[in-house]
Each structure stands twice: as structure tokens, then as C-alpha cells.
Image (cartoon, grey):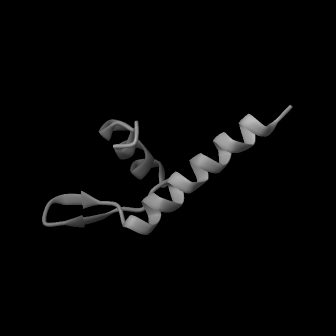
């Protein structure tokens, strides 16, 4: 899962970094929320690479 462990995802949900909903006993992260998080991580990585 994109180099992110299941434990880390649960930590991010608990910390409020990722929104999640329960569906029939499963925890689900909305696709849009996951995509926003991925985009923000990509942007941070690109900024770090571009710094002199």
C-alpha cells in the first residue's frame, strides 16, 4: 500500500490525519482523502528535492 504499513494508517486515522468510516465492521478511508494525503506527501518530497 504505497509503502505505508497498515499500522501507520491506523495511527493516522486515530490522530485525525485521515478521516475514516466504519462499514460492516471494517474501517474505510474515502478515496478522495487518501488521494489528498498522497498528493501532500508527494508535494513535500518534491519541495525537499528542489531545496538547494
Residue at the right extreme? 52
Residue located at (33% from left, 43% from top): 1
Which of the two residues, 8 or 35, is positioned nearer the viewer here? Answer: 35
Image side of residue 44 versus residue 41, left or right: right
Which of the two residues, 31 or 17, is positioned nearer the viewer here? Answer: 31
Image side of residue 26 versus residue 16, left or right: left
What x and y, as percent, mark residue 6?
Answer: 30, 40
Residue at the top extreme? 52
Image side of residue 48 versus residue 23, left or right: right
Q: Is residue 46 above or below residue 13?
A: above
Q: Quadrant of residue 32?
A: bottom left
The quarter in which the C terminus is drawn is top right
Residue located at (45% from left, 56% from top): 18
What x and y, as percent, mark residue 30?
Answer: 37, 66
What x and y, as percent, mark residue 20?
Answer: 35, 62
Residue located at (47% from left, 60% from top): 35
Residue located at (40% from left, 49% from top): 14
Q: Quadrant of residue 10?
A: top left
Label total for image: 0
Amino acid at each position: 500500500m504505497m509503502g505505508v504499513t497498515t499500522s501507520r494508517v491506523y495511527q493516522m486515522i486515530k490522530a485525525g490525519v485521515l478521516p475514516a468510516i466504519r462499514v460492516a465492521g471494517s474501517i474505510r478511508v474515502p478515496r478522495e482523502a487518501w488521494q489528498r494525503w498522497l498528493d501532500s506527501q508527494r508535494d513535500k518530497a518534491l519541495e525537499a528535492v528542489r531545496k538547494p
